[in-house]
Amino acid sequence: MGQMKKKGNVVKVMGTALINGKETYAILVEPQDTILLQMLLHGKQGEISLSIPVQDHQEKGSIVKSRISFYVKDVSNKVETSYEKGRFRFGVRQKLKISISERMFPYNVEKDYKKLEKAIEEELHKYYTQLIKKCQKANADASVHVIPEVSIKGNGVIK
């Protein structure tokens, strides 16, 4: 359920409120995490745009953060389930086709696109791990492991 806050004449989207099995408020999932959660649960619905830091290209002491923005063109999730030690476990292999819209660091995408795909995968994996831990603190009982696989299909107009 979406959660909004009104301050004066301005309405701000706070994120998605999740409820637990007792149908009471559990946690607030922030907007970017809501996008990841929706991709995990429903694949691609509508236009999806993400902006994430890329640690491999962050210069120490730099004021400008190394970030990359991209459109998700397609998402497919393959879910593997198992039952171990009295608990369900889920492994999700998520394939994403993306088109880069902006990058805040110099990079030869045509030459080193595999390295960039790997850096994006690692960052998305961190985000998913944090999101799942946050949901588990709100009484989720499943172990979930997400493995994003990124494929760059476009480099926008940036050269």
Image (cartoon, rainbow, N blue to C red):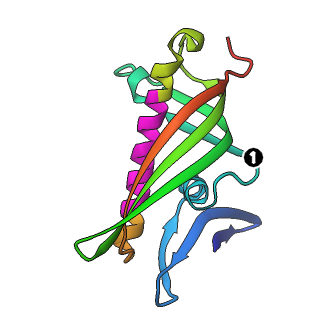
Left or right of residue 145, residue 124 in this image: right
Magenta stretch: give its range: 118-133
Q: Quarter holding the N terminus?
A: bottom right
Compared with 155, 72 (above or below) is below
Residue 14: % across, % down: 60, 64
Give the dominant element type of the magenta stretch: helix, strand or loop: helix
Left or right of residue 124, residue 100 in this image: right
Residue 54: % across, % down: 46, 29
Question: Who's the residue at 68% across and 51% down the image?
Answer: 44
Q: Nearer the viewer, residue 139 or 43?
A: 43
Q: Nearer the viewer, residue 67 or 9?
A: 67
**Is residue 118 in view from this perspective?**
yes
Question: Who's the residue at 38% across and 53% down the image?
Answer: 129
Q: Please rate how many residues cluster around mark 1, counting C-alpha atoms within 10 Å: few if below 14, some from 14 to 19, many from 20.
A: few
Residue 16 position by quadrant: bottom right
For label 1, the residue is 47
Q: Residue furthest bottom?
A: 22
Residue 28: % across, % down: 51, 69
Q: Amino acid at mark 1?
A: Glu
Compared with 114, 7 (above or below) is below
